[in-house]
Image (spheres, helix red, strand yellow):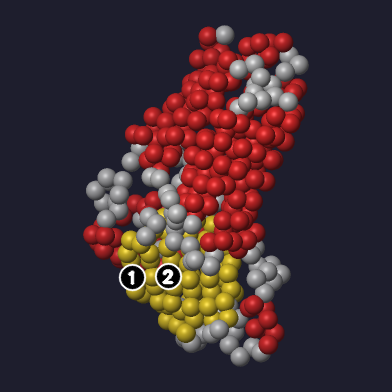
């Protein structure tokens, strides 16, 4: 048993070392406005995301990006960010210039550019989505005269088609339609996908949920446990996204890791988990601030926030249901084994505790 536990903890340590930053940036915004033969765009990324695109941005490697470092990296930002946004007019590439680069509220970095074309630009391709973190979403707003389109782009769907000028009412109707054939999903669906992806790839949240089902619990009691967690993280997700109150990630992230370690230890000793809602509610409040990190790392437009909040939270809830629907039958099957019921569940709980503790230390020590 000791050897098995040592192997499980070793795997947990290796896994946690690679996945310690569970809430890295995965979202950016952009506003694109066409003025005749010119396109102006303002893109906002989380500074950590831009640091992946432009490693020299954090010149002194202190984990923080200063205004002076942004100014010194203007030329590189133009090459690595703006030149990777390909704007064309009737198939002819437009020339790009950097208008501004600055730190903005919400831990964001603004990169603004201007594309000059031989005619009205009609196509935007964000090639830079190949260079950012996997699963990154770009919330784009395109303004052409009095028409506005909101889209959510990804590496798999990264093209914006602009309605040609003077194309008549059909073009205007197409521009107003947020989901024409073959286009990226609407903002709401995009945020649902972002929330779903965030929970299904957020290994710390999944470990927390899995630890909850390690202990035998009646289905009705488990529903109460999960509901308490859902209500709690929905409250703090809203508070943080609406800028009512947002604790520092340097506090939230280690606390999430400690919540994993706690339920892991608890799962070693508990024989029945019907009263765990008293634990999942306060820990759910902490996890909600972690969920909000995916939305607060960039400056969302005020009118997009309600849609983003609703869609992202809905995606998280769908992801939780999917994860539990997969875990519960598996646990039911495993509990039929005497070895798992007496020893295996405790070994898994010990491994989860090890993961939580390593997560905690890593996140405290990480810049």
Q: Pointer 1: residues within 10 angstroms few (<14), some, or many (20+)? A: some
Determine the secondary structure under disc 1: strand
Which residue is at a point 68% across and 14% down the rendered structure image?
A: 341
Q: Which mark is residue 199?
A: none
Identify whether 350 is placed above or below 299. above
Query: Residue lying furthest top in this view?
Result: 1
Q: Earlier in the sequence, mark 2 or mark 1?
A: 2
Residue 114 appears in the picture as rendered: yes
Residue at (69% x, 40% y) in the render: 322
Pinpoint residue 134: horizontal percent, then vertical percent.
53, 49
Say how many tags the image has: 2
Quickly name the residue at label 2: 42
Q: Where is mark 1, residue-wise? A: 100
Residue 89 in the image, given as x and y percentages of width and height:
52, 81
Q: Residue at x 65, y 83 (%)?
A: 172
Q: Using the image, determine if residue 134 lies above or below residue 322.
A: below
Residue 4: x and y in percent read 56, 13
Q: Quadrant for residue 77, please give it.
A: bottom left
Q: Is residue 165 above or below residue 282?
A: below
| Front residue of 187 and 54 | 187
Of the pair 314 and 282, the residue shown nearer to us: 282
Tag 2 secondary structure: strand
Q: Is residue 109 left or right of residue 173?
A: left
Residue 308 or residue 168, whichever sits in front: 308
Q: Nearer the viewer, residue 103 or 119?
A: 103
- Whether label 2 touches label 1, CB < 8 Å: yes
Q: Quadrant of the C terminus?
A: top left
Q: Residues within 10 Å of mark 2 (few under 14, many from 20)?
A: some
Instruction: Please indicate, yes or no, whether residue 157 appears anywhere in the rendered image.
Output: no
- The residue sitting at 45% across, 54% down in the picture is 244
Q: CA distance from mark 2 to mark 1?
A: 9 Å
């Amino acid at each position: 048993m000791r050897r098995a536990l040592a192997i499980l903890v070793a795997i947990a340590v290796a896994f946690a070392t690679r996945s310690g930053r569970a809430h890295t940036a995965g979202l950016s915004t952009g506003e694109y406005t066409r003025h005749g033969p010119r396109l102006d765009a303002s893109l906002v990324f989380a500074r950590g995301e831009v640091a992946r695109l432009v490693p020299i941005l954090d010149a002194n490697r202190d984990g923080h990006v200063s205004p002076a470092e942004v100014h010194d990296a203007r030329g590189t930002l133009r090459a690595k960010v703006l030149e990777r946004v390909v704007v064309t007019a009737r198939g002819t590439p437009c020339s790009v210039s950097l208008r501004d680069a600055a730190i903005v509220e919400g831990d964001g970095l603004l990169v603004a550019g201007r594309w000059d074309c031989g005619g009205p630009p009609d196509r935007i391709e964000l090639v830079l989505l190949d260079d950012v973190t996997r699963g990154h979403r770009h919330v784009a707003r395109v303004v052409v005269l009095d028409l506005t389109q909101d889209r959510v782009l990804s590496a798999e769907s990264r093209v914006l088609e602009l309605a040609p000028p003077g194309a008549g009412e059909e073009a205007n109707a197409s521009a107003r339609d947020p989901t024409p054939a073959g286009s990226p999903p609407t903002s709401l669906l995009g945020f649902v996908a972002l929330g779903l992806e965030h929970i299904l790839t957020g290994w710390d949240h999944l470990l927390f949920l899995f630890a909850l089902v390690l202990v035998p619990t009646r289905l009705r009691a488990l529903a109460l446990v999960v509901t308490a967690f859902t209500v709690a993280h929905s409250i703090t997700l809203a508070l943080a996204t609406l800028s009512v109150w947002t604790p520092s990630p340097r506090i939230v992230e280690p606390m999430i890791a400690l919540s994993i370690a706690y339920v892991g230890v608890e799962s070693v000793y508990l024989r029945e988990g019907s009263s765990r809602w008293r634990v999942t509610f306060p820990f759910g409040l902490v996890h909600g601030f972690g969920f909000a990190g995916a939305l607060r790392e960039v400056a969302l437009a005020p009118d997009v926030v309600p849609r983003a909040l609703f869609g992202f939270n809905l995606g998280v809830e769908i992801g939780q249901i999917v994860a539990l629907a997969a875990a519960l039958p598996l646990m039911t099957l495993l509990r039929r084994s005497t070895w798992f019921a007496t020893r295996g569940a405790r070994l898994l709980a010990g491994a989860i505790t090890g993961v939580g503790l390593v997560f905690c230390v890593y996140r405290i020590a990480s810049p």
